[in-house]
Image (spheres, helix red, strand yellow):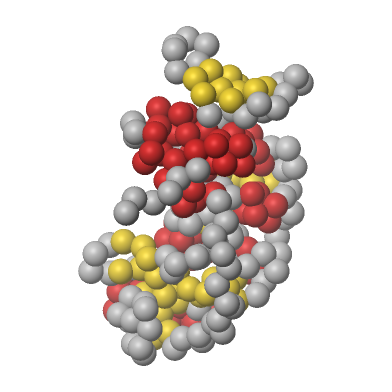
Amino acid sequence: MSEFINFSEISQKIPFKDLLDWLNIPYTATQNGELKGEGFIITTSKNLYFNPIGEDKGSVINFLAKQRGLDLRIAAQELKKNFLAEPKEPKRELPNLELHYCKFLEEKGISQEMAKEYEIGLVKQHSIISGKLAFKVYDELSNHSGYVAYNISKDEWFFPKGFKRTLYNAHRITNQEVVLTISIWETLDYLKKGIPSVSLIGKTMTDKQAKQLAKFINILIVHPEPDNILVRLSRNSYVKVSSA
């Protein structure tokens, strides 16, 4: 039996701004309530778009389908999965895993002292991330919120179900200047040099991460596609993009 998809609910409940930020697409807001970018003009009051130089138009479903080359049903399923709240699961007590220093960290140039300070290590006990390299993460209130993991043999990241991205390492930064990266490894490289750094843990920036970054006066962005993030952060901070 196929999953029920309420196209009308998805079209009405998901604001275009949230979709653009999720897709990391740059845009500008006009005084008359429009969002404009390359190949689209969005009327926010109606939550609809049209392409001024093409024929495509419609809702957030049509927009995602056009951007990703998807059929409308698949696009709607993607939006439902990523934006519409699911029933909350009972809150579980977070495990406090033992993190073991390993040869891989040594090869990465991360000392045993640094691994301990930044709470990184191989998980050997029974866990969903057993056998993976774990990074302890904290929420916007500096509370332990779980772990993200790196599969050494597959060279890929693992995020537990329901994981909500906040800034990696933000709770340790007291400076008003910071380097913003998309990768935990990049952030650790800056930290090894004594440069304060935080990571989005991905290419896009969530609203929660944007609020966390608002506390910094100067931000250097190291990102292959920085335009969306640059515009959003420049409302509160002095922002530069790395030329590296």
- Vertical order, 35 against 201 (above or below): above
Q: Quadrant of the N terminus?
A: bottom left
Residue most toward the left? 153
Q: Residue at x 36, y 90 (%)?
A: 125
207 or 12: which is nearer to us? 12
Q: Is residue 17 visible?
A: yes
Left or right for 29, reference 57:
right
Left or right for 107, reference 30:
left
Q: How many marks?
A: 0
Q: Residue at x 57, y 77 (%)?
A: 90
Q: Residue at x 62, y 54 (%)?
A: 209
Q: Quadrant of residue 153?
A: bottom left
Q: Quadrant of the C terminus?
A: top left
- Vertical order, 76 against 135 (above or below): above
- Vertical order, 90 against 62 (above or below): below
Residue 86, x across and y down, in percent: 54, 60
Residue 55, x across and y down, in percent: 44, 12
Residue 49, x across and y down, in percent: 56, 22
Q: Residue at x 35, y 88 (%)?
A: 126
Q: Is residue 24 visible?
A: no
Residue 106, x across and y down, in percent: 34, 75
179 or 28: which is nearer to us? 28
145 or 221: which is nearer to us? 145
Residue most toward the front? 1
Q: Quadrant of residue 236?
A: top right
